[in-house]
Amino acid sequence: MKHRIVVLGAGYAGAFAAGNLARRLSPADTEITVVNAVPDFVERMRLHQLAAGRDIAFRRLTDVFAGTEVRLRLARVTGVDPERRTVTLAGEDGTGGENGRGGGAGELAYDTLLYALGSSVADHGVPGVAEHAFDVTGLASALRLRERLAGLGAGGSVLVVGEGLTGIEAATEFAETRPDLSVALAARGQLGAWLSPKARRHLRQAFDRLGITVHEHTVVEAVEPERAFTAGGGSLPADVTVWSAGFAVHPIAAASGLEVAATGQIVVDRTMRSVSHPDVYAAGDCAYAIGDNGRPLPMSCASAGVTNMQATAAIVARLTGAAIPTTALAYHGNHISLGRRDAIFQMVDGEARSKSWFLGGRTAARLKAGVLGAAAWGIAHPTFGLPKRKHRLPAPADRAGVGVAA
Ligand SMILES: Cc1cc2nc3c(=O)[nH]c(=O)nc-3n(C[C@H](O)[C@H](O)[C@H](O)COP(=O)(O)OP(=O)(O)OC[C@H]3O[C@@H](n4cnc5c(N)ncnc54)[C@H](O)[C@@H]3O)c2cc1C
C-alpha cells in the first residue's frame, strides 16, 4: 500500500510543499493529495490590489500541479482526527470534489499530514467587525470589498483599521487607485513605529503624498455601517471600514486535539513536526515555529517559505530513512508596498529590530513586484535548480515506525 500524504491548504506553504514532495518522492510508493477550498492558487499578498480593483489572474491549481501526480481535492476542511488519522471534508454545497470532477465529501485518511490552512482576519471580538467591516485576508472577502469600493462614489470614506503591514499596504493601494475617495488609517500606536527613523519618514511622506489621514493612538472599539467608534467616546466616518488588525488561525487545529499555542497555531519542533502527533506537520501561518533567533516566526510569506522547506525536507528524510537536513528558519525583513510606485524594504536584525538601512521608492517597488512574481512562479517550480531524482521508500515491511520514530 502506498504511503498517503495529505496536504491541507494550497497557499504559499501548502502548494509549494505538495509540488516539492511530488517531485522528490516516487509515485510508485507515495500518494499525495492536496485539499483546498478554492480551485486557484490565491496570491494572498496581492489581495489588497485585487480589492482596489486591479485585474489579477490567479493560476489554476491544476496548472500549478501539472506534470506531477498530485491529486487535488476541492473541498473545505472541517476537522482533523489525529488519533484516527483522518480529515473531514465538505464542499460549499456539502459535496467535495476532486480535480474539479467531483469526488464526494467525507473522510480522507492519511499516513502523514501537512497542515497548511493559513490564517484569516482577527476581529479580536470587536463588536460590529464581523457584520459591517471588510477585509483583505481571503479571496472571498477581498472580492466583496472590491465590489463595495467599485460602488462607492467620489468623496466616499474608507477607514483602514490597523497599522501593520497589511493595513499600510491596503490604505496606500486604495488611496493611489481611488484618489477620489477619502482614505484614513486608524493606528493603535504611532504609524510605522517599528521602522527605522528614515523608513518611518519615508512612510509618512508617502501617506502625505497620497492624501491619507492618519489617526494615531486611536483604538477602534466598535464598527457600524457608516462609522467606527473609538476609545474615549469619539467616532470616525467610514462608508467602508477595512479591518486589518491582524491574522488569526482557523480553530480546526485546536479542536482536533493537536497541541496548539495560545494563538491557536500548531506547536511544532525544529522539523515542523507536531510536538503532540508525530504524523502531523505544520507550515505557514498556522505553525507555531521558533526561528533560529529563538523567537516565533511571524506570519508571513517568508515564514511560509522557510517552514515548508523544513517540513518537506523532514518528511522526505523520515520516509526514506535519510538524515534530516536542517534548513534555515530566519526572517530578514519587511517589504511593504506603498501603492504601485513606491515601497519600503526594511531589513531587521536577529532580534527582529529594524536596522538603520532601508530601501525606499521606485527601486523598492520594482523589487517588491519581483518578489511577488517570484513567489508565484516558485509555487509551480518548487524544485527548480535541485536534483530531479525521485526517492523510493523502503519496502512496506521496513516502513513500520515511519512518521513515529524521532
Ligand atoms: C493583503 C495581504 C498582503 C500581504 N503581504 C505580505 C507581504 O508583503 N509579505 C509577506 O511576507 N507576507 C504578506 N502577507 C502574509 C502572507 O500572505 C501570509 O503569511 C501567507 O499567505 C501565509 O501562507 P500560508 O500558506 O500559511 O497561508 P495561505 O497563503 O493563506 O494559504 C492557505 C490555503 O488554505 C486554504 N484554506 C484555508 N482554510 C481552508 C479550509 N477550511 N479548507 C480548505 N482549504 C482551506 C486557502 O484557500 C488557501 O489556499 C500578506 C497578507 C495579506 C492578506
Image (spheres, helix red, strand yellow):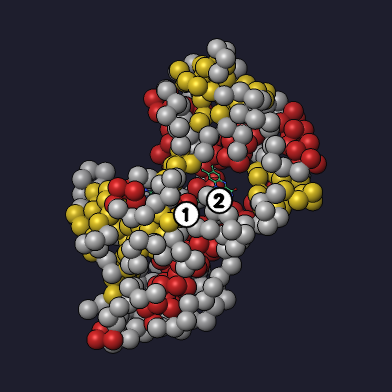
The outermost residue toward the top is: 233
Q: Residue at x 42, y 22 (%)?
A: 128
Q: Please, is residue 161 above or below residue 263 in the view?
A: above
Percent x, y of residue 151: 49, 24
Up/down of 17 relative to 172, above or below = below
The answer to whether residue 164 is left or right of residue 134 is: right
Out of 7 and 401, give the one closest to the viewer: 401
Kindly tell me whether mark 2's CB lies below 8 Å from ligand 1.
no
Kindly indicate the quadrant of the structure image that contains residue 291: bottom right
| Lateral position of residue 396 relative to residue 67, left or right | left
On screen, residue 49 above or below 305: above
Is 260 positioned to the left or the right of 96 in the image?
right
Residue 182 visible, this orientation: yes
Q: Bin the neighbour count of mark 1 within 10 Å (Cα to Cα): few under 14, some 14-19, many 20 and up.
A: many
Q: Secondary structure at mark 1?
A: strand
Of residue 163 and residue 290, the one placed in the foreground of this image is 290
Sooner in the amino-acid sequence: mark 2 or mark 1: 1
Camera-near label (2 vs 1) is 1
* Nearer to us in this view, 251 or 238: 251
Q: Position of residue 361 (x, y in %)?
A: 76, 44
Helix, strand or loop at label 2? It is loop
Q: Identify the mark at residue 298; answer none if there is no mark.
A: 2
Residue ID for mark 1: 288
Q: Quadrant of the N terminus?
A: bottom left
Residue 20 in sight: no
Query: x, y percentage for residue 107?
Result: 20, 57
